[in-house]
Amino acid sequence: MSEPTASNEPTLEPGSIAASDLSPVERTSLRSPASRIAALAACTALVAGLGGFLIGRTSGSSDQSTLKAGASVAESSDSVANTNGANTPGAPVSNDSMGDSKIGSSSARLDGGGMFSLNAYEEPKQELIAERTTTSGITMRAHLQDYGAGANPYVGQFGSWMPAGWCFPTGNLRISIVTATAVNISGAAWFSEPKGGSAISTFAAGYAEGSPVYGAAVQVSAGITSVTFTTASGLTDTAPVVRGVALLAVSGPIEQAFTTTLTSADGTTSSQSNADLSLPYDGSDYAAACEPPPPALPDAGAQPADVVAAEAAVRESWNVARDFNNTDSAARLARIDDTTGIADAWKALSTGEFADAAKTSSTTIQDFVFSSPTEAWFRYDVTTAMGNFTNRYGKALLGNDGVWRITRQTVCQDLGLAPGSQCTPPVDTLYPPSAANDPRYGQSDIGISEPRPAVEPIAITVAPQN
């Protein structure tokens, strides 16, 4: 997102984070296992898409007035003045803080009104890492603001485990774009390791002036020496890589489709479209690289006499208990240790709007252990047409009749995924004991409760424009 001019005022999306006023950890938030898709997608998109813009605006833009209108201007300006040790947020500005003793207190205002607006701010010093002027006269400069080690929201929480370098930005690029007729500021997230070899942020300039420019900052892995940027209409630019980034721009409007071609030191090339680079954040590669390992199953205890046969029996009971297509209700209930309320929940599910999703759903057991000869734990994923539910936990118990049965809590927690199909009485989601010490989860008097974020998201509200 490029820096807006006075005639192109920005709008902030819900959940936006004012990056320059927050600690590095607050720049991003974690997703709970119950809602990881929506929250992490929003979080990473926020940092990548708006991080540079907000940092530039709050730390040093020369056109802050476009962020404020009406009463919100006074509050924003007062807060900034306070960072220089002059004012308290929301308090009237003294004559001395204005630098003019002739202005009376009744007329000393920071909300404009045709009088005075404080729009001069000091930017933190940043390192210039790349500068380039195209043959058509477009000059771009990239300054890097390094977030430091605190950019990793999981630091110190999961032992030696660390997310991949492309999961969370470790800095921000402040990108200036200057032409003979236009000037603009944009931003791009900076990663310690771009996923798949490249991380691309597009920018634009010149729209207010009527001479649009479209470009991209492309961060690349080591060994890439140049990058070519080609739009769908055929506009193209090639730039060398300087300190891991190539700055590219063409004279023309924004285009939704483009291709980047990376050239290696040995002359080999690889090309990707912007569609290829759009990562779904519920993908298995993201979960494996960016989410901490799931809580561990209980340690293995004394084992059944025939471990192979016992595990096969547990898996058979699991398959029967959740088979809504070919197994009748009585047979399914026979594989559950406590059937209270389950038949009614099944009926509600089979007649509800999620019936087809339940019938076509599948499960995959990812981990399995016998904690004793009569108790088995397993971790599994549920795949449905409505969405996937990963890292769920189940338990089975060996009955006196020699039949392994799935616990009521395991069955009911999955029925509860479909609104209106909960068991009565309801159950808590099942987690192994190791989750009690996991920062992603809380603990209640009756066991492990639903997961909660380790870091709460922080949002700001911008007053509507008059």
Image (cartoon, rainbow, N blue to C red):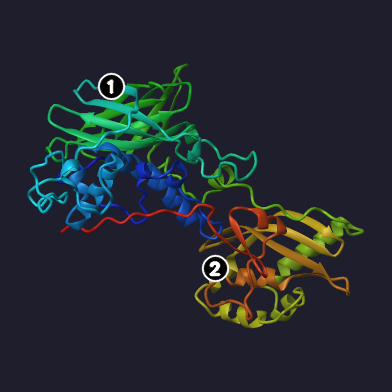
Q: At 82% across and 53% down in the image, what residue appears? A: 300
Find residue 132 and name its label: 1
Seen in the picture, residue 13 relative to 158 is either above or below; the reply is below
- The front one of 238 and 157 is 157
Q: Nearer the viewer, mark 1 or mark 2?
A: 1
**Which type of secondary structure does the marked residue at label 2 adopt?**
helix
Q: Residues within 10 Å of mark 1 (few under 14, many from 20)?
A: some
Query: Mark 2 or mark 1, which is nearer the start of the sequence?
Result: 1
Q: Residues within 10 Å of mark 2 (few under 14, many from 20)?
A: some
Seen in the picture, residue 299 relative to 56 is either above or below; the reply is below
Q: Quadrant of residue 452?
A: bottom right
Q: Quadrant of residue 32?
A: bottom right
- The front one of 10 and 441 is 441
Q: At 16% across and 40% down in the image, what residue appears? A: 207
Find residue 357 and name its label: 2
| Image-based side of 318 in relation to 257, left or right | right
Residue type highlighted by circle 1: Arg
- Residue 129 lies, in percent from the top left, at 36, 23
Residue type highlighted by circle 2: Ala
| Image-based side of 175 in relation to 163, left or right | left
| Image-based side of 257 in relation to 339, left or right | left
| Image-based side of 169 in relation to 292, left or right | left
Q: Quadrant of residue 414?
A: bottom right
Q: At 59% across and 70% down in the image, what residue appears? A: 359
